[in-house]
Image: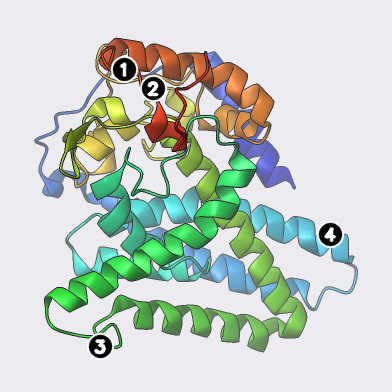
């Protein structure tokens, strides 16, 4: 259980001690100058593979460990595969290089969430801040309700998006080019390996770490766009995605840990930009979180605390960027305006 403590509390303390990093690298830096940064993300897939399955092999033969201790160990492993593994897969899936995209698929298969690639690239980036994006948390929607919703909605939206792409080519969803067949094969292989190494206990431990990783991912997804929407222009069209449609956080230590994921405003503005080159924005261009993700995800687990922190900021954001819009229905899909 030391891993969650280090991740959540140590990096929160480091954020407080070190402060913000508002400097920006040259966004035109070529890939050739980023070889070491690319290597960090590429090497993680085999390291995580060895960690997860090596631990399954070891702990299922360690008779001194109780059931609770086994759960605690793999809860910690899930924090690693969620905080680092899924985050690195997110970086890799946005690149054109085939090896990088393949490593993203392997990382996601290790947490049984392979459809995240299709959902993220085909749905989330296209429809962020609109009712068509399941991942954009609605105003006043608590995390626990959000979590149950996205577990189903994201899978459905990802599958439908891939089926629509195939239909435009005149192919059925059963065509073997549908990436879901790759997703299912990789995930099945991971489950079979966990069972081969540790039996039913190994399979259970694998699913514990996978669920923990998914929970970590969706906590971050919840924080990144809570209450933010894009203006509807009519005829089903929305304004282009801008930095103001994602929460930004410039906290230095947690951005080290999360390879600049908290510079999320720039990521949505320029999705293919590699993590060392992501730009920071001031409050004039993007809404700012009061703390880094470690603290904000803890707050998200307590909806009354979360609403007390974030709802006033959402209202200020709307007054700053969209003062002419008084109907808040895009946040909660209700007929009544948002209460103040």
Q: Which residue is mark 4?
A: 69
Local crowd size for mark 1, using a 10 Å CA cut-off: few (<14), some (14–19), many (≥20): few
Local crowd size for mark 2, using a 10 Å CA cut-off: few (<14), some (14–19), many (≥20): many
Q: CA distance from mark 1 to mark 4?
A: 41 Å
Q: Which residue is mark 3?
A: 175
Which residue occupies 23% across, 23% down? 24
Q: Position of residue 339 (x, y in %)?
A: 52, 18
Local crowd size for mark 4, using a 10 Å CA cut-off: few (<14), some (14–19), many (≥20): few
Q: Position of residue 314 (x, y in %)?
A: 44, 19
Q: Which mark sits nearer the N-terminus, 3 or 2?
A: 3
Assess whether mark 2 and mark 1 are in contact (beta carbons under 8 angstroms): yes
Nearer to us: label 1 or label 3: 3
Determine the secondary structure under disc 3: loop
Assess whether mark 2 and mark 3 are in contact (beta carbons under 8 angstroms): no
Q: Which mark sits nearer the N-terminus, 1 or 3?
A: 1
Local crowd size for mark 3, using a 10 Å CA cut-off: few (<14), some (14–19), many (≥20): few
Relative to residue 86, is residue 75 drawn left or right? right
Q: Which residue is mark 2?
A: 250
């Amino acid at each position: 259980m030391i891993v969650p403590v280090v991740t959540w509390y140590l990096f929160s303390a480091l954020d407080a001690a070190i402060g913000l990093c508002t400097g920006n690298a040259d966004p035109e830096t070529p890939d050739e100058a980023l070889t070491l940064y690319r290597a960090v993300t590429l090497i993680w897939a085999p390291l995580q593979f060895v960690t997860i399955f090596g631990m399954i092999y070891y702990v299922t033969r360690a008779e001194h460990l109780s059931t609770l201790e086994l759960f605690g160990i793999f809860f910690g492993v899930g924090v690693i595969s969620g905080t680092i593994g899924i985050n690195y897969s997110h970086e890799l899936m946005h690149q054109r290089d085939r090896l990088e995209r393949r490593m993203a698929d392997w990382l996601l298969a290790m947490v049984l969430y392979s459809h995240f690639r299709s959902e993220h690239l085909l749905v989330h980036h296209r429809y962020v801040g609109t009712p068509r994006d399941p991942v954009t948390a609605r105003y006043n929607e608590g995390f626990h309700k959000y979590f149950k919703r996205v577990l189903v909605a994201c899978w459905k939206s990802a599958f439908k998006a891939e089926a629509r792409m195939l239909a435009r080519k005149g192919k059925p969803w059963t065509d073997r080019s549908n990436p879901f067949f790759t997703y299912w094969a990789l995930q099945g292989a991971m489950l079979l390996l966990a069972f081969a190494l540790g039996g039913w206990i190994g399979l259970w431990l694998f699913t514990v770490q996978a669920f923990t990783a998914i929970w970590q991912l969706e906590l971050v997804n919840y924080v990144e766009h809570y209450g933010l929407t894009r203006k509807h222009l009519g005829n089903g069209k929305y304004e282009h995605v801008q930095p103001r449609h994602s929460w930004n956080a410039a906290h230095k230590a947690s951005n080290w840990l999360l390879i600049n994921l908290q510079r999320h405003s720039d990521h949505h503005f320029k999705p293919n930009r590699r993590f060392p080159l992501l730009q920071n924005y001031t409050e004039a261009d993007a809404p700012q979180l009061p703390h880094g993700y470690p603290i904000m995800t803890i707050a998200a687990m307590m909806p009354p605390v979360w609403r007390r922190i974030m709802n006033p900021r959402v209202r200020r954001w709307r007054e700053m960027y969209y003062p002419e819009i008084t109907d808040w229905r895009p946040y909660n899909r209700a007929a009544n305006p948002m209460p103040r």
